[in-house]
Image (tube, helix red, strand yellow):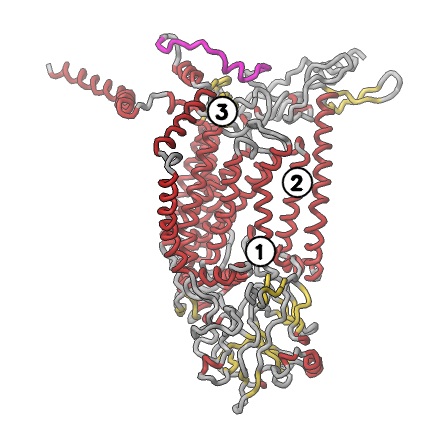
Amino acid sequence: MTITVRPSALKRRRQQLRDMPAATGRGLDDRLQLASPGLRTLLNKVFPDHWSFLLGEIALWSFVMLLLTGTFLALFFDPSMEEVTYNGSYTALSGVEMSRAYESTLTLSFDVRGGLLIRQMHHWSALLFLAAIVVHFLRIFFTGAYRKPREINYLIGVAMFWLAFLLGFTGYTLPDDALSGSGLRIAHAIILSIPVLGTWTASALFDGDFPGTAIMPRVFILHVFLLPLALLGLITAHLLIMFKQMHTQWPGAGRSNRNVVGERFFPRYISKQTSFLLIVFGVIAALGGLFQINPVWLFGPYKAAVVSVATQPDWYVLFLEGSTRLFPSWEIRFPLFGEHFTIPTLFWPGVVLPGILTTLVVAYPFYEARKLKDKQIHNLLQRPRDVPVRTGLGAMGVTFWLVLTLSGANDVIASTFDISLNATTWAGRIGAVVLPPLAYWVTHRVCLGLQQHDRQVLSHGVETGILRRRPDGGFMEVHQPLGPTDPHGHGELEYTGAPVPKKMNRLGALAPATRGFLAPVERPSTPPTEPPTPNGYEGTEVAGTDQSR
Amino acid sequence: MSADTASGPGTTGTETGQRTADELVAEPAELDVYDPRLTRFDLVREGARRKGIEIVHYEPRFPPGSRADRRMERVVASLFLLAGAAGMGFVVAYIWWPWEYADGATATSKFYTPVLGVTLAISMLAIGAGITTWAKKLLPHEVSVEHRHDQPSSDTDRKIMGATLGNMLDETGVTRRPLLRRALLLGLAPIGLVAAAPLVGGLLKDPHTNRTGEPGFNASPQDYTGWNPALNDEQPVRLTFENGSPIRPADVSVGGQVTVFPGIDHGASNEYADSPTLLIHLREEFAAELRQNLYPMNQDSMAGNFVAYSKICTHAGCPPSLFEQQTNRLLCPCHQSQFLITDNARPIFGPATRSLAMLPIAVDNEGYFVATSDYQVPVGPSFWER
């Protein structure tokens, strides 16, 4: 009898196993109502797909990497300014007096297994983080993604740039090597240059005169706690708002201001996100392992009397370094209430200029909306060519920033190309004034030209590269219209700001080369044409040509 | 690939055709989800549709089980295996590769960090590439359209919300009871100050006191450098090398320069970050030129053909330590200010505005350089009360 019972028990067990997912689901829904449409909407949420939408994500994943590697570094780093004598395994610095901060940086580079890799990955992530933020910002600006309803996220983005900037600066200050000390010295001078409040502020931050011993622990707490906390809060807000407002999309077939065309969140979009995170991590790991960054042991500990040639900050600070180098020696000194007061040179390029640049960036969306009397909701992006004024202004800003950034390295440029140092300074001074308007003019013209070409193709069709001889002996090129044409042979498609195909193979006229390394991995696509005509020419209908010539 | 469908009219081959997606979304006709003929995907599509999401195009990238499909499966699998192998390589290298720092170009430990980085990178990139391939080649290709719900709330909702918020305010009565409102503000203000007081009070430090805690003569933070005799029992402070040994005129050759520090305890440390000074032995003709140009204040500051300038730039505080013998210029490597040492270290190029301060020096009875007094002007960057 037992023999007959067993299989049925087994069967029951199997049945139970098969029912388990459903039973778990029921159990969870009883308690959390997971089957409600809310979660379903989340799983099915549609994201548009375009490479330019991934730039901000590089920043996000770099930030995750910064948190991971930074936590590791904090286990070994000691921000103390106590004077110690180095005794570690890097023999070149044996017996050198240095601060505990610098010593612990050396220790985690040489005496902690794998510490150098983590430190270099941390630094590369920071550089990548700032680069991704800047490129993401340019994408947002040049495509008009900041327009209503996304102004709030734009402002959060600007705030995040400055937080990231401060995080980067405090980060490379912490090792207390010769390079970071010079940076801190200049930062001290910039704070000192603020009228009225400067000396008191500097004295409060540094607990007296430069450098003192209080500054490094304070920079440390800013770098590992206050600034990341603020950044984390803003990132959360940035993502939640993006999620709520849904992503912008490019104009195109089937796309309108009221919909999103793309892929659902699960599983395709989330898979691509995960893989992108790993790819960003992989690139950072390769950079950290293969490319030396900030070799602090070569610079030595910070000493007020020591500086090396080609003292350059990290790339995102270079524009301020450049503005400081270019700004003329205009110091204002004036009597007031019987005393003399000074506004130092450094105040203008170090405090006022970044203030002006930030104000312009913050104000632009509101200025544009007011100027255009635009209160509409915009979910479709604009191609840069379709808004020549904005694109021109953007090019102007980028050019100005580039001139300053290059000027931040003018000593390296001068020595590399054997140019007079003073000539590079003057080139920067003149360039910063002359090149931006020039960039505006050129960009504006280029935008109009590109628009014209799009309109031309919409009206006259795509160049086929086929020349025909007319009965009167002249030659003409055959054009392929993109859609229906009017009696004159002109295309009737409207200009919508969407990309216009300019080549025949974008229209499927030429079969793409079959993919696959050794063997074809897909069926070669059949050209959407009739069999070739006897003369071997195109088979599609070609407007205004005589097929039976 | 879906990126291609994003490129606009003419290239899109989806089922949307010429209809706009809004029209598609607008189709109502709810399905009966208990209909036994419906497939599971029909249910998925119906569920999405009920929330304004239309899956308009959905097909496998390659026919399941086809050659291309199996090939892609193999590619993804090999990428994952490669990731595993590289990850294992990382762990093995981490444990057994010699890692301790050693001098010499041949030390294997030099390759410790690159080996770790490369194995780590390969493992992460391989998983990343594997998942990407999976998503792009093995998951069904789809185009979905979601209706945006970003229109402002309806007038009704706005009216109700306005009433709710207004009522909330009325309930508290702050609009009706000005006394309470003012009392509350007056009560809260000090609490705000309480929060700020410890921070401000704890950090604030009067910049106008010198090292001994007395008010400075020029109300400046830099007025009291390590050269002040007050720090040396009112004796003139000696010029010393970094290691603390005093300097004789013979130690600096003609046309040479040396960085000197105050000969007091920790004189060469960052405790006296405003004190490093450049001692220059000028050639006879340049010394004569400088003597002619000396500011009245600096008349007694040179010792023979020797002159000592502050090494803290008057622009941003870097050490202007690049000495061009040919042009007699000092160059600051931070912002390229250039100072002419035959004319009181006057700035002649770059952003600096003021001359480097000149330290009054002399040679004492024992033949060593001393500073006869502290700097006569504040050294270093400018500031408001200067």
* Residue located at (48% from left, 18% from top): B54
Q: Chain of mark 1?
A: A
B220 and B187: which is toward the camera: B187
Q: Chain of mark 2?
A: A
- Quarter of the N terminus of chain A within the rendering: top left
Q: Please identify, in this view, whether the residue under mark 1 or under mark 3 is nearer the observer.
A: 3
Specify whether B363 is left or right of A8: right
- Bin the neighbour count of mark 2 within 10 Å (Cα to Cα): few under 14, some 14-19, many 20 and up: some
- Bin the neighbour count of mark 3 within 10 Å (Cα to Cα): few under 14, some 14-19, many 20 and up: few
Q: Position of residue A28 (x, y in %)?
A: 28, 25
Circle 1: element type:
helix
According to the picture, the residue beneath numbered tag 2 turns out to be: A393
Q: Do dots 2 and 1 share one subunit? A: yes
Q: Position of residue A285 (x, y in %)?
A: 46, 46
Disc 3 marks a residue whose amino acid type is: Pro
How far is disc 1 from disc 3 in space, using C-alphas? 43 Å
Circle 2: element type:
helix
Residue B117 drawn in magenta: no
Q: Chain of mark 3?
A: B
- Bin the neighbour count of mark 1 within 10 Å (Cα to Cα): few under 14, some 14-19, many 20 and up: many
Relative to A431, say whether B149 is above or below: above
- Quarter of the C terminus of chain A within the rendering: top right
According to the picture, the residue beneath numbered tag 1 turns out to be: A350
